[in-house]
């Protein structure tokens, strides 16, 4: 079962995803899939850490979680060589044992920059 409510699945104005500790996509909503510009059938189970540009996924992986599991709160740039999007984001580690990640914009799509 995903960490986010299933009614977020079709939303484009919210970005939500669950990743493994090594950057493999476990679950995502339409907003996340739009950023990485691939269909769900092509992406679930795929390595998606490369889409985390600033901070990058390796940096996020090294951050110690706070008591509530949050590891990052701030601007997060995602994308590829063609298009990037900077979002107001929050990233949590679901629990220290499973090493899963989740990210979601705090106030929606927030297209702050676009290349």
Image: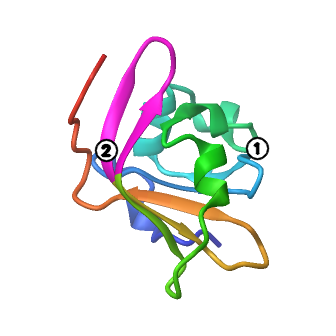
| Foreground: disc 1 or disc 2 | 2
Specify the label residue 102 is tagged with. none
Residue at the spot of label 2:
87
Query: Relative to residue 74, is residue 69 depicted above or below?
Result: below
Look at the image and tell me in which quarter the N terminus lies: bottom right
Q: Is residue 38 magenta?
A: no
- Give above or below for 30 relative to 53: below
Residue 61 pos. (x, y %):
66, 56
Question: How many other residues sit within 10 Å of disc 2, few (<14), some (14-19) or many (≥20)?
Answer: many
Query: Which residue occupies 48% across, 58% down?
Result: 103
At horizontal 58% and vertical 54% (from top left) the residue drawn is 60
Q: In the image, is residue 87 part of the stretch drawn in magenta?
A: yes
Judged from this view, the residue extending furthest toward the bottom is: 67
Residue 81 placed where, x, y %? 50, 13
Quarter of the figure with the C terminus: top left
Report the span colored magenta: 75-88
Mark 1–mark 2 Cα distance, whole angstroms, equals 23 Å
Residue 45: numbered disc = 1
Residue drawn at (53%, 88%), measured in percent from left and top?
67
Q: Main secondary structure of the magenta part?
A: strand
| 12, 55: nearer the viewer | 55
Indicate the secondary structure of the residue bearing disc 2. Answer: strand
């Amino acid at each position: 079962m995903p960490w986010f409510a299933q009614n977020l699945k079709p939303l484009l104005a919210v970005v939500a995803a669950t990743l493994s500790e090594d950057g493999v996509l476990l679950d995502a909503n339409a907003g996340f899939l739009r950023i990485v510009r691939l269909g769900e059938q092509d992406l679930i189970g795929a390595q998606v850490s490369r889409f985390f540009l600033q901070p990058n996924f390796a940096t996020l992986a090294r951050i110690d979680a706070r008591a509530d599991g949050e590891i990052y709160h701030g601007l997060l740039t995602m994308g590829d060589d063609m298009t990037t999007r900077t979002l107001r984001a929050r990233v949590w580690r679901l629990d220290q044992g499973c090493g899963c990640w989740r990210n979601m914009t705090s106030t929606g799509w927030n297209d702050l920059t676009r290349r």
